[in-house]
Image (cartoon, helix red, strand yellow):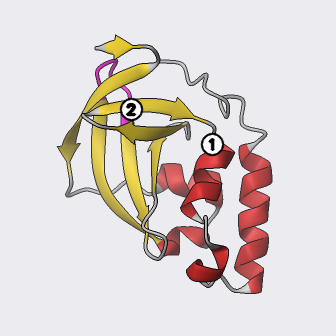
Amino acid sequence: MIRDGYIEGIMTQGDNPDWAPLVAVIGEILPGWFMWMFEVELIDGRILNAYKHRMTRQYIHLSRIGAAFDYRHPDYYLQVDLAMSINRAFNARERAELPADQLKDLDKALRVAGEYPWSSYNDPA
């Protein structure tokens, strides 16, 4: 069901991680701060991968083309701004203890995220 921008999704598997969407949006180095948790299939057929930051415990849910979604209880997802989602995952940079060179990688990822054509809520179904 799709309702007011919220789209239903269910967890489909938790055994075969797909790192490609995360690497595509934050580069090769920063994914080391994340755990792949599970895959979700939205009712419209899109697949999301759920990644959890090891330090901040914040999730990023990404479609295969890098669009960001937030989980909304129960079993609904809402597309959100990609840069906002990345920034929230690293919301406490000092807690995340990123080295200076990785902070530069994060700043670059945030800049690039703002340039994605679907960055602001328009991932095609």
Asked if the residue under mark 2 is in contact with the one under mark 1, i.e. CB atoms within 8 Å, the reply is no
| Magenta stretch contains residue 20 | no
Residue linked to disc 2: 77
Helix, strand or loop at disc 1?
A: helix
Q: Is residue 44 visible?
A: yes
Residue lying at 21% horizontally and 41% vertically, measured from the top left: 11
Q: Which SS type dominates the magenta stretch?
A: loop
- Find the magenta span and give its range: 42-47
Helix, strand or loop at disc 2?
A: strand
Q: Residues within 10 Å of mark 1 (few under 14, many from 20)?
A: many
Residue lying at 38% horizontally and 47% vertically, measured from the top left: 49
Earlier sequence position, callout 1 versus callout 2: 2
| Magenta stretch contains residue 45 | yes
Residue linked to disc 1: 82
- In the image, what residue type sits under mark 1? Leu
Q: Quadrant of residue 110?
A: bottom right
Distance of label 1 from label 2 (alpha carbons): 14 Å
Q: Is residue 102 left or right of residue 92?
A: right
Q: Position of residue 65 (x, y in %)?
A: 54, 36
